Amino acid sequence: MKQLVILSGKGGTGKTTVAAALAHLASEEMPVVMADADVDAANLELLLSPQVRETHDFAGGKLAIIDPDLCTACGICAEVCRFEAIIPGDDTYRVDDIGCEGCASCFYQCPTEAIRMEEHRDGQWFRSDTRLGPLFHAHLFAARENSGKLVTLVKQKARLLALDEGRELLIVDGPPGIGCPVIAASTGADLALLVVEPTISGIHDLERILATTNHFGVPALVCINKADINPSRADEIAAFCVAQGIALVGQVPFDTVVTEAMVQGQPVTEYDDGPVSRELRRVWERVKARLS
């Protein structure tokens, strides 16, 4: 079983559009599993109309809870809290859920044992059925952290299903940027496809995500999305790829048909067979060859 992760150095490059198209094309040839690792703003499901089969709660960590009946308002917890998450009161103290990082310093220092650490429901993860194959996705609640931990969970569940059912390919729609969620999504991947756009910051964004994949030993390919909106910038990115010895596997043109496909809830390669879809098919052939 191979793992392909689609990444970008920033949001809005068309990463999910490319991921959905490759999932559609791959599903025509082999059994696939998909994972939407952008748990902070998952949207792959918008193109696949998933039917949820399983829903599970996610606890990213523990938060401190102060028992008002045991609290003597001594103030020690507030003194040791590095995150200023303890809110003083006249007779008792309480914890700011958003500010608490779950470090448990207050728990260990409380002289009356008025503080306990409890798991906090930070989000949910789902296993769904789609017309292209199983999809694992998640929703991290607002102001909750540990998104890297949730990404790891979603990806691991998808990987285990792929192994159990003998599916040949796991396609991971990764989060944007270069932070912990991206690292979690990239772990164990056989290949990364980096989607970049021809803007002023395009090469900078590409350098950031390429440095991340290189650091973790994940081979990378590059695809320029909406390449024709700024040909000179696209040429700069192509020259950068040559200089770095990275294969540029596609230059997808801009076309409003992509938006039309989104409105219809379909990958663009399923909705239309125009220039965008034809170029994405070429991208898939090159990605498939590298995976092989």
Image: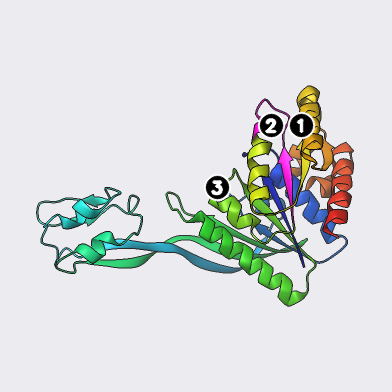
Q: Residues within 10 Å of mark 3 (few under 14, many from 20)?
A: few
Residue 275: image quadrant is top right
**Which callout, 1 or 2, points at the residue further toward the start of the chain?**
2
Up/down of 265 relative to 35, above or below: above
Secondary structure of the residue carrying numbered label 1: helix
Secondary structure of the residue carrying numbered label 3: loop
Q: Amino acid at mark 3?
A: Gly
Between the residue at mark 3 and the residue at mark 2, the CA separation in whole angstroms equals 18 Å
213 vs 123, left or right, is right
**Which callout, 3 or 2, points at the residue further toward the start of the chain?**
3
The image's mark for residue 237 is: 1
Residue 292, position as x, y percentages in the image:
86, 60
Q: Amino acid at mark 1?
A: Ile
Instruction: Assign the N terminus to one quadrant of the image.
Output: bottom right
Judge whether residue 9 is colored magenta.
no
126 vs 119, left or right, is right
* Residue drawn at the location 88% of the way across and 62% of the way down: 29
Residue 24, position as x, y percentages in the image:
81, 55
The reply to whether the C-beta atoms of the residues labelled 1 and 2 are less than 8 Å apart is yes
205 vs 132, left or right, is left
Q: Amino acid at mark 2?
A: Gly
> Does the image show residue 255?
no
Give, as a single range, the part of the protein colored magenta: 191-204
Between the residue at mark 1 and the residue at mark 2, the CA separation in whole angstroms equals 7 Å
Q: Residues within 10 Å of mark 1 (few under 14, many from 20)?
A: many
Residue 199, position as x, y percentages in the image:
69, 27
Tell me the residue that label 3 is attached to: 179
Between the residue at mark 3 and the residue at mark 1, the CA separation in whole angstroms equals 23 Å
- Relative depth, front residue between 258 and 205: 205
The reply to whether the C-beta atoms of the residues labelled 3 and 2 are less than 8 Å apart is no
Tell me the residue that label 2 is attached to: 202
